[in-house]
């Protein structure tokens, strides 16, 4: 079986696509925040547009990451030991509960983009709000990812998994 064929087979597995996409919300938002900060310091409207688009892409990518994670949940759960299953439940719980932060970030980025054209005096406050909320989203993404990393990487586990009674596996069937 050649490598391309194998790759195409893997791309049909939601858990594989989830692993490919899962860094995007955090990495793209981090790059967007950096770019937007520089663009604001430079007072460059074109650079602000590009930076806000990067923030928008990063925040919007949280949706497919969540959906592919939900679709691959049962398969990963079945192949995991009990500690990993508890971490997987924690990871899914965090993602489902806090994905709204990424959506809020995306909405702010859209509002800031719109303000650049329609309401220029609102563009700076909206861009600053976007940076702040995007930074919070990066932190949330790191916290979600921390639990996800514990699932397949026992070498990263620094303590016991979350208590079993905190999260019910049955609520995560997708």
Image (cartoon, rainbow, N blue to C red):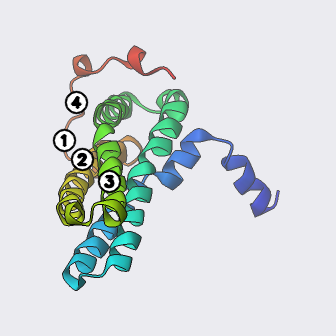
User: On the image, numbered disc 3 is attached to which residue?
Assistant: 111
Q: Disc 3 to disc 2, how far (Cα)?
A: 22 Å
Left or right: 114 in relation to 14? left
Q: Disc 4 to disc 2, how far (Cα)?
A: 17 Å
Q: Position of residue 170 (x, y in %)?
A: 41, 14
- Mark 1: few, some, or many residues within 10 Å (few <14, many ≥20)? few
Q: Nearer the viewer, mark 2 or mark 1?
A: 2
Number of on-image labels: 4
Q: Nearer the viewer, mark 1 or mark 4?
A: 4
Secondary structure beneath dot 4 equals: loop
Q: Disc 1 to disc 4, how far (Cα)?
A: 9 Å
Q: Position of residue 66 (x, y in %)?
A: 44, 39
Q: Nearer the viewer, mark 3 or mark 1?
A: 3
Q: Which dot marks residue 130?
A: none
Mark 2 in CB contact with mark 1 (< 8 angstroms)? no
Whichever of callouts 3 and 4 sits on the residue coming sooner in the sequence is: 3
Q: Which dot marks residue 162?
A: 4
């Amino acid at each position: 079986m050649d490598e391309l064929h194998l790759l195409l087979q893997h791309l049909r597995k939601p858990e594989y696509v989830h692993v490919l996409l899962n860094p995007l919300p955090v990495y793209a938002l981090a790059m967007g925040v950096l770019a937007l900060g520089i663009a604001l310091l430079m007072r460059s409207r074109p650079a602000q547009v590009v930076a806000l688009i990067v923030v928008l892409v990063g925040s919007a990518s949280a949706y497919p990451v969540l959906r592919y994670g939900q679709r691959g949940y049962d398969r990963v759960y079945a192949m995991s030991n009990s500690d990993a299953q508890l971490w997987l439940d924690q990871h899914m719980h965090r993602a489902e509960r806090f994905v709204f932060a990424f959506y809020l970030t995306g909405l702010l980025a859209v509002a800031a983009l719109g303000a650049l054209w329609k309401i220029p005096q609102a563009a700076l406050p909206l861009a600053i709000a976007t940076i702040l909320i995007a930074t919070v989203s990066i932190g949330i993404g790191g916290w979600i990812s921390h639990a996800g990393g514990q699932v397949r990487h026992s070498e990263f586990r620094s303590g016991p998994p979350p208590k079993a009674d905190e999260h019910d596996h049955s609520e995560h069937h997708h």
